[in-house]
Image (cartoon, rainbow, N blue to C red):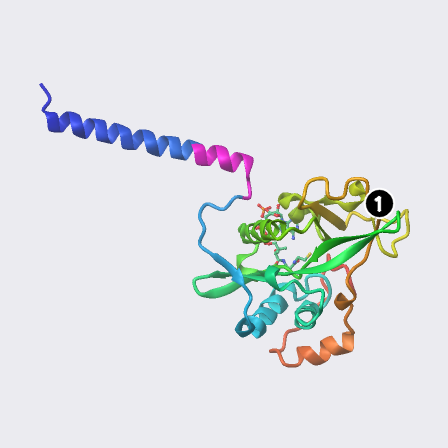
Amino acid sequence: MPSVTTVTLVTFVTLVTTVTLVNALATNLYKSHNPHAMEKHDFTIRHEEEKDHSKVEYLIRESFWNVYRPGCSEHYVMHVLRDDPAFVKELDFVMEKDGELIGQNMFMKTVIEADDGSTVPVLTMGPICITPPLKRKGYGKALLDYCLAKAAEAGYGAVLFEGNIGFYGNCGFTYASRFGIRYHDLPEDADSSFFLCRELKPGYLDGITGVYRTPKGYYVDDKDVEQFDKAFPYKEKLKLPGQIFS
Ligand SMILES: CC(C)(COP(=O)(O)OP(=O)(O)OC[C@H]1O[C@@H](n2cnc3c(N)ncnc32)[C@H](O)[C@@H]1OP(=O)(O)O)[C@@H](O)C(=O)NCCC(=O)NCCS
């Protein structure tokens, strides 16, 4: 006859095996429905502080460099926007891993000029970036999901901006044209698939059609960018395939 100790041990091992199997099954089921979910959280997200400013600008420069044009301007855009009245300080976030800044994202207030003559307050977003060595590992999606949840908690109704549906589609964005929102100064027959929208309050844009305006602060002078960039370590500007600006 097995002793009480043996029975207890067998019961314990069976229980542990069952729990492990159920956990593995649940994780696989979750991942099959959320292919971009991260296995574990090895990062923290917090508000950007003044002490982070230059590190964040360096991070943005590293991440955007030669991606959309030879060089980039986004580090200067960030530098300028922090002092813009439309800047949303409570939605200005950095992501850290092992004590290093690995990502950032921020929001600006703007409006849709509705066809009925009203003005609908909305948010726009970015720059958002992840440090180059950690791109395509799920950190960008984790950061964006967090920021969007915080923006919704803060009571904002919708976010619109220019971006790649390949990435933003994973975070609930779709084409803004589906909401009846047009991009300023874009001819009616032009491709507007770069212009994306996500409601933060379901139904916020119901019954609204109109034109979205990019906040003025995003338009920076190339000469100012050049001047600002001189304070950073030299990096070669390259013309690469896939860049959308010359
Ligand atoms: C865009 C960016 C923030 C995305 O962050 P990330 O951590 O690299 O992205 P994730 O790993 O979370 O991506 C999740 C999924 O989104 C999609 N995705 C991510 N980046 C993409 C891109 N550049 N093009 C198309 N799809 C993309 C993919 O489906 C990806 O999953 P996969 O790698 O299994 O294919 C980051 O790559 C980055 O900093 N890029 C340079 C700066 C930039 O372009 N910022 C956005 C300006 S609009």
Query: How crowded is the residue under tag 1: few (<14 C-alpha within 10 Å), some, or many (20+)?
Result: some
Q: Over which residues does the magenta segment extend?
A: 26-36
Q: Position of residue 138 (x, y in %)?
A: 54, 50
Residue, x 72% and y 78% (percent of image)? 226
Task: Answer with the quarter of the image where residue 6 lies.
Answer: top left
Residue, x 63% and y 45% (percent of image)? 171
Q: Position of residue 27 (x, y in %)?
A: 45, 36
Q: Is residue 5 left or right of residue 71?
A: left
Q: Secondary structure at mark 1?
A: loop
Q: Nearer the viewer, residue 35 or 56?
A: 56
196 w.r.t. 21: above or below:
below
Is residue 96 rendered magenta in the image? Answer: no
Q: Is residue 227 left or right of residue 15?
A: right
Is residue 27 rendered magenta in the image? Answer: yes
Task: Answer with the quarter of the image where residue 75 lies.
Answer: bottom right
The quadrant of the image that shows the C terminus is bottom right
- The verdict on label 1 being within 8 Å of ligand 1 is no
Q: Is residue 72 visible?
A: no
Q: Amino acid at mark 1?
A: Thr
Q: Is residue 205 left or right of residue 12?
A: right
The quadrant of the image that shows the N terminus is top left
Q: Does the magenta stretch mainly form a helix, a strand or a loop?
A: helix
Question: Which residue is the site of mark 1?
Answer: 209
Q: Position of residue 158 (x, y in %)?
A: 71, 49
Q: Is residue 170 left or right of residue 31?
A: right
Q: Position of residue 73 (x, y in %)?
A: 71, 69
Residue, x 52% and y 44% (percent of image)? 37
Residue, x 71% and y 64% (percent of image)? 86
Q: How many marks?
A: 1
Q: Is residue 110 visible?
A: yes
